[in-house]
Image: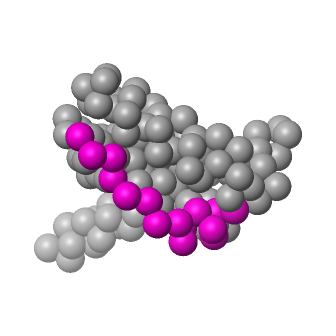
Amino acid sequence: MKKIYLSAITAVVTVVFCGWIATAQNPVKDSSKTVQGNGTVVINTTSLCQKVDGFMGPTPIEIRIRKDTIIDVIALPNDESPGYFYDASKILKRWIGLTPKQGLELEVDAVSGATFSSKALIENMRAGLKRAMED
């Protein structure tokens, strides 16, 4: 009985130790924030805002920041109605030229007629800017 108990403990310790070694050698990469060769920080909200939905589902964006200034915001593929989403995505220009801190403080209203999409874009923007300010 003691041999079986000891074997079980040894097996559990081995599995835990091997898992720890594998994680240490292959750390989980965070695809939400990358830095390009020219120093541009790129924030992708796909993984950050998986549960932030517009009218038809997630509305991820990519935020580009260089020298602490937002230089571009790009709407990524989504299932929103193209016409409504086009109207909603116009609000993304409001953040260009601001610092991430200023962007978080910016008050932006939803676009009438595209309320769900624009509110989701605003929430993606805020989550992305918070991520940009980390590290």
- Residue beneath the point at 33% across and 61% down: 11
Residue at the limit of the structure toward the bottom, as seen here:
2
**Magenta segment includes 80:** no
Q: Position of residue 46 (x, y in %)?
A: 42, 43
- Residue beneath the point at 83% across and 38% down: 37
Q: Quadrant for residue 5, please give it.
A: bottom left
> Up-down: is 116 above or below 101?
above
Q: Quadrant for residue 63, please give it.
A: top right
> Up-down: is 73 above or below 132?
above
> Up-down: is 3 above or below 31?
below
Q: Which residues are magenta?
A: 99-113
Along the viewing direction, whichever of 14 and 84 lies nearer the viewer: 84
In-image side of 98 versus 26 (left or right): right
- Residue beneath the point at 38% across and 67% down: 13
In-image side of 13 versus 56 (left or right): right
Along the viewing direction, whichever of 6 and 114 lies nearer the viewer: 114
Q: Quadrant for residue 55, please give it.
A: top left
Q: Position of residue 85 (x, y in %)?
A: 34, 32
Q: Is residue 79 visible in this depiction of the protein?
A: no
Along the viewing direction, whichever of 13 and 53 lies nearer the viewer: 53
